[in-house]
Image (cartoon, rainbow, N blue to C red):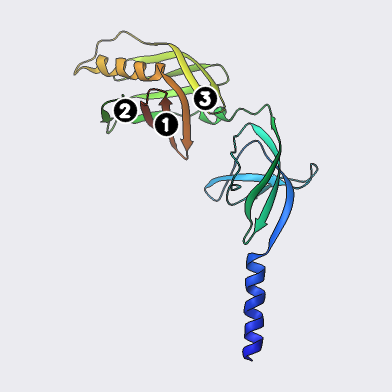
Amino acid sequence: MKNYLFLVSCFLFFVGTAQTKKTIYVADRFMACDKKDCMQVKEKKKDAWQNIKDTIIGLNYEEGFEYRVKVVVSGSNNYSLVKLLSKKKTGYNPAVKLEGKKWVLFSMFDGSTTMGLGDSTIFITIDVTNSRIGGHGVCNKLKGELKAEGRNISFSDLSFTKMKCVDQGNIMEKIVTNLLEVTGSYQLKGDKLTLYSAKGSYMNFKEQ
């Protein structure tokens, strides 16, 4: 009986640690699954894409590119990169995920001071397709142009309408445009959007 249990334990250990080498394709975008973004893979061009729970360890993945990689699969479908075989840019622009949403500003850092805004009325809307930004400040409407590709985003020709605010609202709107004008990249996590500048400033938004 003891020998039997020992053999069973060895078998289960082997199954749990067995490794398989595969060459797979990786899709150019994440797919929503189980309340998170999942990577998509397949072994043959004609196969349907399949979601995997975790990212491929060692692969510096960017949406907008299709990959062909050699991997080791171990345990419960844990993927580790062995070799990058190809990386091909596709027509998909991941920045389109920012469209059609109202992004409400809840905090920002101007390089020296962090500002929490509580129940802010300041929001932006992003139209990647038509290269436009809209929104609202403390009192005035915002408009301008943008460029967004991959993880990069920048804004130009920004302006608010000219209504005079109370309680230094116009100063806050000026701070907002100054930070937007130096933005160079973004990070999207769930319903949170962060805009970053090369100078170290950032703006945090939440989808509403």
C-alpha distance separating marks 3 and 2: 19 Å
Which residue appears at 24% of the width and 14% of the height? 165
Which residue appears at 27% of the width and 30% of the height? 114
Residue where numbered disc 1 is placed: 194
> Residue 154 placed where, x, y %?
48, 19
Quarter of the image holding residue 170? top left
Q: Is residue 130 above or below residue 107?
A: above
Dot 3 falls on a residue whose secondary structure is: strand
- How packed mark 2 is, by other alpha carbons closer than 10 Å (few <14, some 14-19, many 20 or more), is some
Q: Residue furthest left?
A: 167
Q: Residue furthest right?
A: 46
Residue where numbered disc 3 is placed: 152
Q: Residue furthest front?
A: 83
Name the side, left or right, on which 102 lies relative to 16: left
Q: Is residue 9 above or below residue 15?
A: below
Q: Earlier in the sequence, mark 1 or mark 3?
A: 3
Front residue of 134/81: it is 81
Q: Nearer the viewer, mark 1 or mark 3?
A: 3
- What is the number of the mark on residue 109? 2
Q: Nearer the viewer, mark 1 or mark 2?
A: 2
Which residue appears at 65% of the width and 35% of the height? 28
Query: Amino acid type of disc 1?
Result: Thr
Query: Amino acid type of disc 2?
Result: Phe
Quadrant the N terminus occupies: bottom right
